[in-house]
Image (cartoon, grey):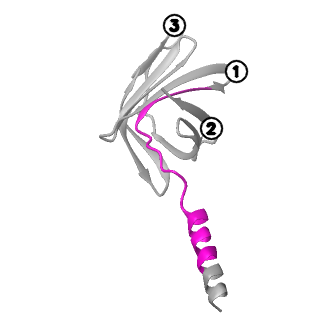
Amino acid sequence: MRNSLVALAAALALAAIAWQPAQAYSLVGTWRGSVMVNGAVMVSSLVLEGNGRFNELDRAGSLMSEQTGTWQIVGGLLHLTVLDWQPKEQCLPTTGCLPIRQPPGSLYRVQWLSANVIRCQDVNFGGSITYYRG
């Protein structure tokens, strides 16, 4: 009986160790990644600050966009709320300048590949980008 209790206690201790959640990493920092969009390479820099602010700068060839705002984790998803953006207009020789409306922000499912690598899957629009810390 005593051996059975010792074996049960050991099994429960091992189960508790195996059940512990994965290492929790911080998203705070500078992240860089790239992805193909409509046949062009888009390079992205995402800065998530500890005060809940973010800055995202995306470049594809001669085109760029920048968004700033707030970020938070809600329901396990990364929410980026855009408060300011650039450019605010697009100027073409044939149409002149047209305003660019406020971007909708982003909602990402974040998968940790390591302490310094994340894959962000866009919940609303599909697609994903892998970011590297640094």
- Residue density around tag 3, few if under 14, some if 14–19, many if 20 or more, within 10 Å: few
Label 3: element kind: loop
* Residue 61 at x, y percent in the picture: 58, 12
Look at discs 1 and 3 and give the one toward the viewer: 1
The magenta-colored residue range is 9-34
Q: Amino acid at mark 1?
A: Gly
What residue do we see at 61% from left, 86% from top?
A: 5
Cα–Cα gap, marks 2 and 3: 33 Å
- Residue extending furthest front? 2
Look at discs 2 and 1 and give the one toward the viewer: 2
* Residue under numbered circle 1: 39
- Residue 93 forms part of the magenta stretch: no
Q: Nearer the viewer, residue 108 or 62?
A: 108
Disc ID at residue 93: 3
Q: Nearer the viewer, residue 69 or 6?
A: 6
Label 2: element kind: strand
- Residue 10 forms part of the magenta stretch: yes
* Residue under numbered circle 2: 128
